Amino acid sequence: MNVELVTNERRIKRALAKSTCKNFTIINEGLVMVKFMPKKIIQNKPMYTGFVALELSKVLMYEFHYKHIQSIWR
């Protein structure tokens, strides 16, 4: 997690407008702590939705091949 301590009101508005801003905490009247999510996400695990989409497309292609194409070529 990235943390930024901000004292300028203009800079606070800019920091809160970022898409990676997670939340903020007002420490005192002139100091705000803004927490950001990491910009880069490391995905070292499989994406299950992508895996399922590929498996369903394989099933569809196999069914088409064995039910339609092979019946034409026999």
Image (spheres, rainbow, N blue to C red):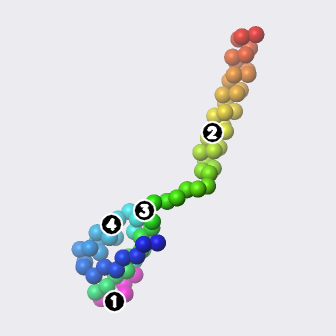
Find out whether residue 13 is within the magenta segment: no
Circle 4: element type:
helix
Question: What residue does disc 2 label?
Answer: 54
The residue at 66%/37% (across/down) is: 56
Classify 10 Å Cα crowding around label 2: few (below 14), some (14-19), many (20 and above): few
Q: Earlier in the sequence, mark 1 or mark 3?
A: 1
> As shown in the figure, which amino acid type bears the numbered disc 3?
Lys
Which callout, 1 or 3, points to the residue nearer the camera? Answer: 3
Residue matched to label 4: 17
Residue placed at 45% from the left, 60% from the top? 40
The answer for how far apart the CA atoms under marks 4 and 3 are is 15 Å
Q: Nearer the viewer, mark 4 or mark 2?
A: 2
Q: Residue at the spot x=38%, y=62% of the render?
A: 19
Quadrant in the rendering for residue 8: bottom left
Question: Which label number is shown at residue 28?
Answer: 1
Crowd rating for badge 3 (residues with CA inside 10 Å; few <14, some 14–19, many 20+): few
Q: Which residues are magenta?
A: 25-29
Sequence-earlier tag: 4 or 3: 4
Q: Earlier in the sequence, mark 1 or mark 2?
A: 1
Q: Position of residue 6 (x, y in %)?
A: 31, 79
Instruction: Return the disc, 4 or 2, that comes first in the chain's sequence.
Output: 4
Verify CB contact (< 8 Å) between mark 2 and mark 3.
no
* Residue at x-position 28% and y-position 69%: 14
Q: Amino acid at mark 1?
A: Asn
Which is closer to the viewer, label 4 or label 3?
Answer: 3
- Point out residue 69 in the picture as x, y percentages from the top left corner: 69, 17
Q: Position of residue 66 (x, y in %)?
A: 73, 22
Dot in front, 2 or 3: 3
Q: Which mark is residue 39?
A: 3
Q: Quadrant of residue 36?
A: bottom left
